Image (spheres, rainbow, N blue to C red):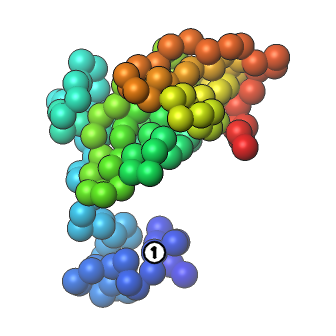
């Protein structure tokens, strides 16, 4: 395996991407159906975005959960640098296209997510850039709005919900 291409299979690489990777000219292969992620500080990246805007966040340390048979919520994480995010992105499994989702009540990375029932998704714990969190956010799937959930007994980050 070459550095930077872990997890990519030849079937996932289209056109000349596989050859460019073999030659080392391009260490990252872009999937042809993925929309370009905006970089931190780029116009249209963050703040005030509404549903339907062409805004996605490059993020790491995020949580993800399927909220129904065709929609995945990707929540929180860390943007370029160390900025923690309170934003979410929604992935439609039928079109494989992301769209902006609702904002959580607090910024968090390293959080856990779990669908509680047909109506609610729990986002728990994490790190806000200064401290580990004992707070939770609940997403009302019907209205696609977050509201504060119950507090955890202990502050947690990099945790898992099952």
How far across and down, in percent of the image, does residue 118 sit?
Answer: 53, 35
* Residue in view at x 54 percent, y 81 percent: 1
- 142 or 55: which is nearer to us? 142
Residue 55, percent across and down? 24, 36
Residue at 27% from the left image edge and 52% from the top image edge: 97
* Mark 1 burial class by Cα count in 10 Å: few <14, some 14-19, many 20+: few
Q: Is residue 44 visible?
A: yes
Image quarter where the C terminus lies is top right
Q: Residue at x 71, y 39 (%)?
A: 161
> Which residue, given by chain and number where applicable, does mark 1 sit on?
8
Residue ranking furthest to the right: 153
Q: Position of residue 84 (x, y in %)?
A: 49, 27
Please indicate whether residue 96 sits to the left or right of residue 151 in the image: left
Task: Give the side of residue 152 with respect to residue 40, left or right.
Answer: right
Q: Residue furthest front?
A: 118
Q: How many marks?
A: 1
48 to 52, vertically: above or below: above
Q: Position of residue 6 (x, y in %)?
A: 52, 72
Query: Can I make out residue 87 in this image?
Result: no
Can you say whether 20 is above or below 49 in the image? below
- Element class at badge 1: loop
Query: Image quadrant of residue 25?
Result: bottom left
């Amino acid at each position: 395996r070459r550095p930077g291409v872990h997890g990519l299979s030849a079937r996932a690489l289209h056109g000349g991407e596989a050859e460019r990777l073999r030659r080392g000219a391009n260490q990252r292969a872009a999937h042809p159906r993925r929309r370009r992620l905006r970089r931190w500080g780029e116009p249209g990246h963050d703040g005030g975005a509404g549903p339907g805007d062409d805004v996605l966040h490059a993020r790491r340390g995020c949580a993800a959960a399927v909220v129904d048979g065709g929609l995945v919520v990707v929540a929180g994480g860390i943007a370029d640098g160390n900025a923690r995010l309170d934003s979410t992105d929604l992935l439609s499994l039928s079109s494989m296209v992301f769209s902006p989702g609702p904002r959580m009540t607090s910024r968090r990375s390293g959080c856990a997510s779990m669908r509680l029932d047909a109506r609610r998704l729990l986002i728990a714990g994490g790190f806000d850039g200064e401290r580990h969190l004992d707070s939770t956010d609940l997403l009302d799937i019907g209205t696609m709005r977050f509201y504060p959930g119950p507090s955890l007994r202990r502050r947690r980050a990099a945790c898992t919900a099952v």
